[in-house]
Image (cartoon, coloured by chain):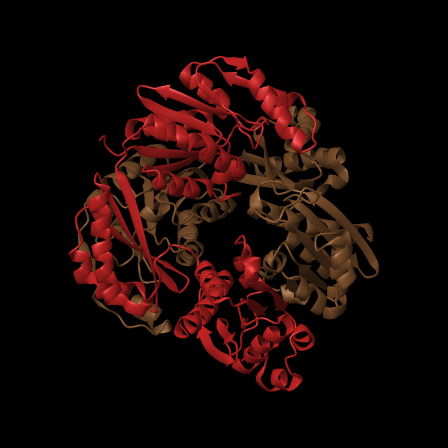
Chain colours: A red, B brown
Amino acid sequence: MKDEMNVEIITIGDEILIGQIVDTNSAWMAVRLNQSGFSVVRVTSVKDVKEDIIEAINHAFVRADIVLITGGIGPTKDDITKQTLCDYFGSSLVYSEKVYENIKEVLADRMKFINQLTRLQAMVPDNCVVIQNHRGTAPITWFEKEEKVLVSMPGVPYEMIGAMEQEIIPRLLQRYPDQPFIRHKHFLVSGFSESALAEKLTDWEDGLEPFLKLAYLPAWGIIRLRITGVHASEQLLEQTIEAQSVQLRNLLGAAIVSEKDIPVEEILGEKLKEKGFTLGAAESCTGGAIAQRITRMAGCSAFFKGSVVAYSNDAKKKVLKVREETLNEHGAVSLETVKEMATGVRQVLGSDCAVATSGIAGPAGGSVEKPVGTICVAAVVNDHIEYRTFHFSGGRENVIKRTVNSTLLLLLEMLQDIE
Amino acid sequence: MKDEMNVEIITIGDEILIGQIVDTNSAWMAVRLNQSGFSVVRVTSVKDVKEDIIEAINHAFVRADIVLITGGIGPTKDDITKQTLCDYFGSSLVYSEKVYENIKEVLADRMKFINQLTRLQAMVPDNCVVIQNHRGTAPITWFEKEEKVLVSMPGVPYEMIGAMEQEIIPRLLQRYPDQPFIRHKHFLVSGFSESALAEKLTDWEDGLEPFLKLAYLPAWGIIRLRITGVHASEQLLEQTIEAQSVQLRNLLGAAIVSEKDIPVEEILGEKLKEKGFTLGAAESCTGGAIAQRITRMAGCSAFFKGSVVAYSNDAKKKVLKVREETLNEHGAVSLETVKEMATGVRQVLGSDCAVATSGIAGPAGGSVEKPVGTICVAAVVNDHIEYRTFHFSGGRENVIKRTVNSTLLLLLEMLQDIE
């Protein structure tokens, strides 16, 4: 049994350092590495500057066993990772027929022709293992140095994911067998503030075994609690976490919405499929965000009929059959309107369940009576309807995200009640 | 005139290193810092581990003038940034009445009561400048050491943004006057692969002044070209970039979709407002993503009527008036169907323009004739209709994003043609 293998991730690219893109690669990689028993201890983002890249690699090699690098290996001049690695490892570039064949195959699929710049991607360092990138033209390179491993892979997420799944994770597992076990156990908790939850859990948290660690992560109306444990004995680790989970369930009861670290829409999707119910949505202030959150799940067509994004009063009346009087008397942002929107869309789409939202997401549109952040939502299961008014703060994006979560949670609660 | 001030960002939190959240803070901060003439040279994400935080600060202080830290200052036990900074700077914790007043104010707004853990947030280091966090309970702390600055702020994006805008940026500008000028000039280019574009621009790129740098960033069917320049003379910098931009415009012509680094939906929104046209959408495979992309823009109600997310054939027939024969003869994923969806939704919502999408985003649902990634889209401007079939690869999420971009681009092209 060896020590836990530590991984550092280095993401390379000026576009990250000027904020033109958000680095989503390292989060994905961390999750995937954890599943295989590898622990990410640091993520460093550096510019396309040779000295910066080399300094980052030097530091990472001191601390970590495995260094995974993404980015900077495209065909254009701003990408210098390959050349920098050659300098670092004292490599010469040699032509690889295999890589060239792969490039041709990848581009054939995209019906594009090969130019000089693309052809140069078939030049690879002579002292590394070259791994084919089946989703792009830049090859993956695997270097070893003093028992440590460095892998350079593309920054394009789709290509990185393919490389990690098909090649890098399997090779790491082969290279480093006998990892200790890492387990994360998640609880999604609703109805508490972070401080109130921490206070409620003080005694229980103090009693946690030293190899278990607790973290709180608030996210738009829900708190994600995470117990993380690392131990050489898988059995002991899992038994201990389960014993603590039993205590936590006793403490929190129905406030635990799920024990999976999945978005609310996935919990709801599972519940709807279990009950054989279909869902429709009528969205005003959420503007399609509910539909988008649901339809990013593959297979959602099993229960999702659709959504009417009724951003204008006109659409509310014509498509959702909201009555003119309701809009005139109570306004678009009112419980009366969302109730009619929910029942209306259920009828139009012929679904069992429906949700509806209307509110003032801001920054404009607020009034004294209905300030920015005033949100009305309704949920329908067959003939039963529930509705609520919320007051959210935190800017447009936050208000929309909290509204989506709160609306889906309302429907989820109703479905759990009719167990 | 001093040298350019270098900033390093350290984001702290186990949740980042296990991939539970994506660090979006540093990208936002980088954009904002650039606007004020500060350059971000590195981003480091570390765990909630004292030694790791201290090592990261030590290294950052060697390279950078300013170190900005986010995260790890919540009320719960897993947050150790404040204590670590006290150890690092040799501070004692003292009670701050001002911070306590701010906490009361923030929580009053949320109608929550103050417990012991929250109260502890009013304890602050005695050798730093304490800055109020008007959007949360954890105060911001500003330390100085050997002419260098370190600021610790909350990791919650909404709180971080408030702190940066209202306090940290203004104070940095006061502390470091006379920054050199940093300018980014963006071009959104469609219709090229990355290699083909680089080939077309080779001569022009070789002729760029040494203080200008070019970068290519492909993003779902569009390439974002970026010229970045740093120079002490604002006038020279801007004139040089403009002169190169003139050449670039001559080279690329209509392939330049925009000269702002904004999403396609914002370009389209501006164009629609300019023409006084309204928009509706009928979405099948994009599942609300078009509506969501448009409605995340404040003020979109000026032109956006709504979207019908018709995820089932039933919804396509009932709400969008797609004919049963069309669906039977050609299938839901066909040019005939999207044409009827587009004209249907335009009629239902009474809009001037409309877009429609139907396709197989995958991973399931493909066939030999219509494999995963087959996408049909249509766009209507008054009585004029255009439609296209695309074949996208890259997984469900990518296929949806490319479809959204391509659909909005199609409509944008049509609007540009009727100049």
Rendered image quadrant of residue B353: bottom right
Q: Residue at x 47, y 33 (%)?
A: A166
- Residue B210 at x, y = what percent? 58, 26
User: Does residue B27 appear to the left or right of B271 in the view shown?
Assistant: left
Front-most of residues A82 and B212: A82
Q: Does B199 sit above or below residue A350?
A: above
Q: Is residue B319 visible?
A: no
- Residue B67 at x, y = what percent? 35, 42
Front-most of residues B329 and B186: B329
Q: Is residue B229 visible?
A: yes
- Residue B247 at x, y = what percent? 72, 33
Q: Residue at x 33, y 60 (%)?
A: B132
Front-most of residues A173 and B308: A173
Q: Does B48 sit above or below residue A125?
A: below
Front-most of residues B176 and A153: A153
> How many discs mark residues in the rendered view?
0
User: Does residue A369 appear to the left or right of B90 in the view shown?
Assistant: right
User: Does residue B110 appear to the left or right of B381 in the view shown?
Assistant: left
- Residue A415 at x, y = what percent? 44, 71
